[in-house]
Image (cartoon, grey):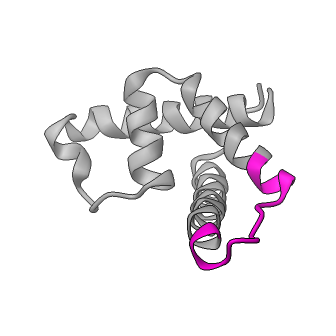
Protein backbone atom coordinates (compact mmCIF):
# COMPACT_ATOMS: atom_id res chain seq x y z
CA UNK A 1 0.00 0.00 0.00
CA UNK A 2 1.19 3.48 -0.79
CA UNK A 3 1.50 5.40 2.43
CA UNK A 4 -0.03 8.86 2.30
CA UNK A 5 1.67 11.64 4.18
CA UNK A 6 -0.16 12.81 7.27
CA UNK A 7 -1.48 16.06 5.79
CA UNK A 8 -2.96 14.38 2.70
CA UNK A 9 -4.54 11.70 4.89
CA UNK A 10 -6.22 14.29 7.12
CA UNK A 11 -7.41 16.33 4.11
CA UNK A 12 -8.92 13.23 2.50
CA UNK A 13 -10.60 12.18 5.76
CA UNK A 14 -11.96 15.69 6.28
CA UNK A 15 -13.45 15.59 2.79
CA UNK A 16 -15.10 12.21 3.40
CA UNK A 17 -16.35 13.31 6.82
CA UNK A 18 -17.99 16.47 5.48
CA UNK A 19 -19.53 14.64 2.53
CA UNK A 20 -20.81 11.84 4.78
CA UNK A 21 -22.37 14.27 7.25
CA UNK A 22 -23.98 16.21 4.40
CA UNK A 23 -25.54 13.11 2.84
CA UNK A 24 -26.77 11.78 6.19
CA UNK A 25 -28.30 15.19 7.00
CA UNK A 26 -29.91 15.30 3.57
CA UNK A 27 -31.42 11.87 4.19
CA UNK A 28 -32.80 12.91 7.58
CA UNK A 29 -34.10 16.36 6.64
CA UNK A 30 -35.30 15.50 3.15
CA UNK A 31 -37.80 12.95 4.31
CA UNK A 32 -39.05 15.32 7.04
CA UNK A 33 -39.49 18.32 4.72
CA UNK A 34 -41.03 16.63 1.69
CA UNK A 35 -42.92 13.38 1.57
CA UNK A 36 -41.86 12.80 -2.05
CA UNK A 37 -38.16 13.26 -1.27
CA UNK A 38 -35.91 10.42 -2.37
CA UNK A 39 -32.21 10.12 -1.68
CA UNK A 40 -30.27 9.23 -4.81
CA UNK A 41 -28.94 5.70 -5.10
CA UNK A 42 -25.40 7.09 -5.29
CA UNK A 43 -25.85 8.94 -1.98
CA UNK A 44 -27.24 5.82 -0.34
CA UNK A 45 -24.33 3.75 -1.71
CA UNK A 46 -21.81 6.28 -0.40
CA UNK A 47 -23.22 6.14 3.14
CA UNK A 48 -23.26 2.35 2.97
CA UNK A 49 -19.64 2.32 1.76
CA UNK A 50 -18.53 4.57 4.63
CA UNK A 51 -20.44 2.48 7.20
CA UNK A 52 -19.05 -0.77 5.77
CA UNK A 53 -15.50 0.59 5.82
CA UNK A 54 -15.99 1.72 9.41
CA UNK A 55 -17.23 -1.74 10.41
CA UNK A 56 -13.92 -3.25 9.22
CA UNK A 57 -11.95 -1.33 11.84
CA UNK A 58 -10.92 -2.22 15.37
CA UNK A 59 -12.96 -0.51 18.11
CA UNK A 60 -10.31 2.13 18.92
CA UNK A 61 -9.96 2.99 15.23
CA UNK A 62 -13.75 3.23 14.81
CA UNK A 63 -14.01 5.55 17.79
CA UNK A 64 -11.31 7.85 16.44
CA UNK A 65 -12.64 8.02 12.87
CA UNK A 66 -16.20 8.61 14.05
CA UNK A 67 -15.37 11.16 16.77
CA UNK A 68 -12.79 13.11 14.74
CA UNK A 69 -14.39 13.08 11.28
CA UNK A 70 -17.79 11.44 10.79
CA UNK A 71 -19.58 12.74 13.89
CA UNK A 72 -17.09 15.23 15.37
CA UNK A 73 -16.93 15.59 19.14
CA UNK A 74 -15.40 18.47 21.12
CA UNK A 75 -11.68 19.01 20.51
CA UNK A 76 -10.17 16.92 23.34
CA UNK A 77 -12.77 14.13 23.50
CA UNK A 78 -9.99 11.54 23.38
CA UNK A 79 -8.41 12.52 26.73
CA UNK A 80 -10.68 10.20 28.72
CA UNK A 81 -9.58 7.25 26.56
CA UNK A 82 -5.92 7.70 25.59
CA UNK A 83 -2.63 9.29 26.48
CA UNK A 84 -1.64 11.97 23.96
CA UNK A 85 1.05 9.90 22.25
CA UNK A 86 -1.23 6.86 22.09
CA UNK A 87 -4.06 8.89 20.58
CA UNK A 88 -1.89 10.34 17.81
CA UNK A 89 -0.35 6.96 17.00
CA UNK A 90 -3.78 5.28 16.90
CA UNK A 91 -5.26 8.16 14.92
CA UNK A 92 -2.70 7.83 12.13
CA UNK A 93 -3.22 4.08 11.97
CA UNK A 94 -7.01 4.48 12.07
CA UNK A 95 -6.99 6.90 9.14
CA UNK A 96 -4.71 4.68 7.08
CA UNK A 97 -6.80 1.57 7.76
CA UNK A 98 -10.09 3.35 7.11
CA UNK A 99 -8.89 4.84 3.81
CA UNK A 100 -7.50 1.47 2.75
CA UNK A 101 -10.91 -0.14 3.42
CA UNK A 102 -12.76 2.70 1.73
CA UNK A 103 -10.64 2.84 -1.40
CA UNK A 104 -10.01 -0.90 -1.62
CA UNK A 105 -6.23 -0.90 -1.40
Position of the C terminus, as image quadrant, is top right
Which of these two is toward me, 58 or 88? Answer: 58
Q: Is residue 32 magenta?
A: yes
The magenta-colored residue range is: 31-44
Which of these two is toward me, 18 or 24? Answer: 24
Residue 54 locus on image (x, y percent): 57, 33
Give the side of residue 8 with respect to residue 68, left or right: right
| Residue at 38% from the left image edge and 36% from the top image edge | 63
Residue 103 locus on image (x, y percent): 78, 36
* Residue 3 shows up from this direction: no
Quarter of the image for residue 15 reads bottom right
Can you say whether 67 is above or below 33 in the image? above
Can you say whether 33 is above or below 104 in the image? below
Which of these two is toward me, 20 or 100? Answer: 20
Give the side of residue 79 with respect to residue 8, left or right: left
Residue 40 locus on image (x, y percent): 83, 59
Can you say whether 57 is above or below 5 in the image? above
Amino acid sequence: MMRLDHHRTVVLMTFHGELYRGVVLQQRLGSCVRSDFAVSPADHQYVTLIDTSLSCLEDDYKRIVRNDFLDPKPKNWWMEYYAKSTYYRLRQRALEHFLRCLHGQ
